[in-house]
Amino acid sequence: MYILDLLIVPIKAMKTRYIPLLMIYFAYGASGFSGIAESFWVKKHLSLGATDLIALGVWLTFPWTIKMIFGQMVDSVSILGSNRKVYVYIGASFIAIGTVIMIAIVGNYQIIQSYNLNKLYIIASVITVIGFVLQDVVADTMSTEVVDRAQNQADIDKELAMVQVMARLSLGLAVFVVAGLGGWLLQYYSYETIFKLSIFIPILSVIGVTLVRLNPTPSSPLNKSIFFGGLAFALFTIIIGYNDLPYSQEIVFVISLAVVLYMLSSLIRDLEAETIRYIVSAMIIIFVYRAMPNVGPALQWWEIDVLKFDEPFFGTLAQIGAAVALAGMWVSSKYIIEQSITKVLVFLTVLGFFLSLPTLGLYYGVHTYLGIDARTVALVDTAVASPFAYISGVLMLTLVAIYAPTGNRGTWFALMASLMNIALSAAGLLTKYLNQWFEVTREVKDGVMVVTQANYDNLGILLWIVVLSGLIVPLLVIWKFDLKGEK
């Protein structure tokens, strides 16, 4: 009966008015459709090394850290009489433009042949990310406005939490639907065709936002210090990044963290002292959990070059991972809502350590001694590990939804999301440092001539550092900031 109860919780909680909103989250999840094609195309056709790609990843997280600008616009600035739907339309347009640029690059269209492919790829990536950031801000804001407010506060809080869970389920369902599809289709279609097909993603967003119905929420006055402070920070980031100053990413990271913390403090200063303590402790714990470094693209390169994993197999891994992740999120939805943040994150941290061991075993050839095929190990590990990547995000979104102030929900969501994405920037910077200290290179050719030799000797130490730091550091922080008195 308990298992049956877990399975039907999301079904019982579903309401028709949620579906259009969930389509926007579905569109975001479907963005991974071209992910495998992009990874293999970049490896084959661009000269960007591991450190370059990690650095690009860090820069691509910064649009997510200036969400307070979009949040203020969603809360306070109407365009054509709308301060919700119009921004999703604008975001979908950006995604469509970025996709068209990628189609031209991958298809080697004549119009782009005089331009540097690396730079065009970066431009397309930035434009697309901005579109998703804008849509994400609006979707998160609307997630509090599809909830029935004509009920007691305890039921409202539960429904707010369940909407966040269903949003992740919608995203996970999209990942499941498209995860392996892109890799499998590469057996029959070109990279260009895959990117052409991905134009369905912004179309889904447009359909969803056109149909969504929201509780009427009055616009709030523009918070000039947050809005113009965010604009100044965005301009500063662009200038620093464009001029490629030494330690530009580190400078932007420190200043962005200071700016977001200052803005958050201005929003929570009127809350009760115990509530502030709880929110701050939760933010620190989740921030550190999300700031742990990863190996970077070198692991996938090694799997391609040494283990001979190809596009269809990566498609299979992605499909299995997405299916199990969706099932895991579905079954654990009740647990996530009812358990404490610290309990869930301790569980995820310890489990993540054990689930990292099979990858270490693959690198050191343990599967060969045991007579197990590497692909079998990868399939099983992906299936077991996949449900847990989404949960920390759901925890923070639930916390934000419960405490979001009326009239400033967009800004509140945006600032908290900015803080969590700054954590990902920290993870990216740490990953970059590790890859600089323990360099791993893939083979790069200029025509038939090998320009850079493949060297994966340092991959083992990278894996060990990532695995051990991901276990020890979060547990120490959770112990230090344990949320006494939480649910």
Image: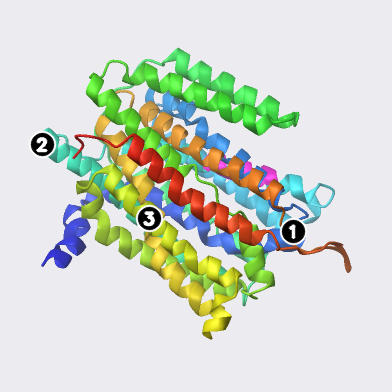
Along the viewing direction, whichever of 194 and 171 lies nearer the viewer: 171
Q: Which residue is mark 3?
A: 350
Instruction: Return the disc, 1 or 2, that comes first in the chain's sequence.
Output: 2
Q: Position of residue 313 (x, y in %)?
A: 56, 75
Identified at 50% across, 21% down, the residue is 259
Instruction: Return the disc, 3 or 2, that comes first in the chain's sequence.
Output: 2
Q: Is residue 383 left or right of residue 333?
A: right
Name the residue type under label 3. Answer: Val
Q: Which residue is mark 2?
A: 151
Quadrant location of the C terminus in the rendered image: top left
**What is the distance, in whole Å, between disc 1 and disc 3 at their CAs?**
31 Å
Q: Residues within 10 Å of mark 2 (few under 14, many from 20)?
A: few
Q: Is residue 49 above or below residue 70?
A: below
Secondary structure under tag 2 reads loop
Name the residue type under label 2. Answer: Gln
Q: Is residue 17 left or right of residue 235?
A: left
**What is the distance, in whole Å, between disc 3 and disc 2 at their CAs?**
38 Å
Q: Is residue 1 above or below residue 399?
A: below
Span of residues in magenta: 122-131
Query: Is residue 235 magenta-colored?
Result: no
Q: Which residue is mark 1?
A: 441
Q: Position of residue 258 (x, y in %)?
A: 51, 22
**What is the distance, in whole Å, between disc 1 and disc 2 at their CAs?**
58 Å
Q: Quadrant of residue 218?
A: top left
Secondary structure under tag 1 reads loop
Which residue occupies the extreme bottom position in the image?
371
Observer able to see residue 320: no
Secondary structure under tag 3 reads helix
